[in-house]
Image (cartoon, rainbow, N blue to C red):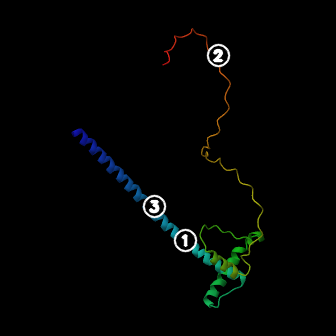
């Protein structure tokens, strides 16, 4: 009886250790997710600021200025700093815009931005057709089909060995 209670106690201790390990892993994952969420929030704020700057830059290039004098002054200042940065670029680099953000932007907001910029965001011609993709993997084995018809009768087998004749059977009744 003591042996059985010892085994039961060992299982309980093992279960308790397993639950503690699981709780520790869950807590670590929660802390990781909280830190990652904070980093992503900071990144989102930075991207929103860049989007705002891009919007202002598009308005400057299109010559659209708001009636607010403070905002107009800020836009002119931004235009001057952009002009200083663009002195070192070639003409080909000036015609390109680098966008390296993996953020979700509402299509409606992007369309408003492009429509309000008077042609700055116009799309170019479609690119060349891409290469064909590689062949897909073989599919899974299908279900077995229906039973087929019975085949033809086969050829007769080989003749057996000759033996002595057996005893007669019982008389018919």
Q: Quadrant of residue 91?
A: bottom right
Mark 2 vs 1, N-terminal side:
1
Distance of mark 1 from mark 3, alpha carbons?
18 Å
Counting from the top left corner in percent of width and height, residue 35 is at 46, 64
In the image, 106 versus 43, the foreground residue is: 106
The earlier-in-sequence mark between 1 and 3 is 3
Of residues 39 and 4, the one nearer the viewer is 4
- Packing grade of label 2 (10 A; few <14, some 14-19, many >=20) is few
How crowded pointer 1 is (Cα within 10 Å; few <14, some 14-19, many 20+) is rated as few
Q: Which mark is residue 159?
A: 2
The residue positioned 36% from the left and 50% from the top of the image is 18
Q: Residue at x 37, y 56 (%)?
A: 23
Spot occupied by residue 8 in the image (x, y as percentages of width and height): 27, 44
| Dot 2 and dot 1 residues touching (CB under 8 Å) | no
- Calculate the distance from the C-alpha at mark 3 to the C-alpha at mark 2: 83 Å
Q: Is residue 64 left or right of residue 10?
A: right
Residue closest to the eye, 172 or 35:
172
The residue to which callout 3 is attached is 32
Binning the other alpha carbons within 10 Å of mark 3 as few (below 14), some (14 to 19) or many (20 upward) gives few
**Farthest front residue in view:** 173
Q: Position of residue 114 (x, y in %)?
A: 69, 78
For the residues labelled 2 and 1, the Cα–Cα distance comes to 91 Å
> Residue at the location (25% across, 40% down)?
4
Label 2, secondary structure: give it.
Answer: loop
Q: Is residue 39 left or right of residue 58?
A: left
Q: From the viewer's perspective, is residue 26 above or below residue 39?
A: above
Question: Which residue of the protein is positioned furthest toward the top in this rendering?
Answer: 164
Location of mark 1 (residue): 44
């Amino acid at each position: 009886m003591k042996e059985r209670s010892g085994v039961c106690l060992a299982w309980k201790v093992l279960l308790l250790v397993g639950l503690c390990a699981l709780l520790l892993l869950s807590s670590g994952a929660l802390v990781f997710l909280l830190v990652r969420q904070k980093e992503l929030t900071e990144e989102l704020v930075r991207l929103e600021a860049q989007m705002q700057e891009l919007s202002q830059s598009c308005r400057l290039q299109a010559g659209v200025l708001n009636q607010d004098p403070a905002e107009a002054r800020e836009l002119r200042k931004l235009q001057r700093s952009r002009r200083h940065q663009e002195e070192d670029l070639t003409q080909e680099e000036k015609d390109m815009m680098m966008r390296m953000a993996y953020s979700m932007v509402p299509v409606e907001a992007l369309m408003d931005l492009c429509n309000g910029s008077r042609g700055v965001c116009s799309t170019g011609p479609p690119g060349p057709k891409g290469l064909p993709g590689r062949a897909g993997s073989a599919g899974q084995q299908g279900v077995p089909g229906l039973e087929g018809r019975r085949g033809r009768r086969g050829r007769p087998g080989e003749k057996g060995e000759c033996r002595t004749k057996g005893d007669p059977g019982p008389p018919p009744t």
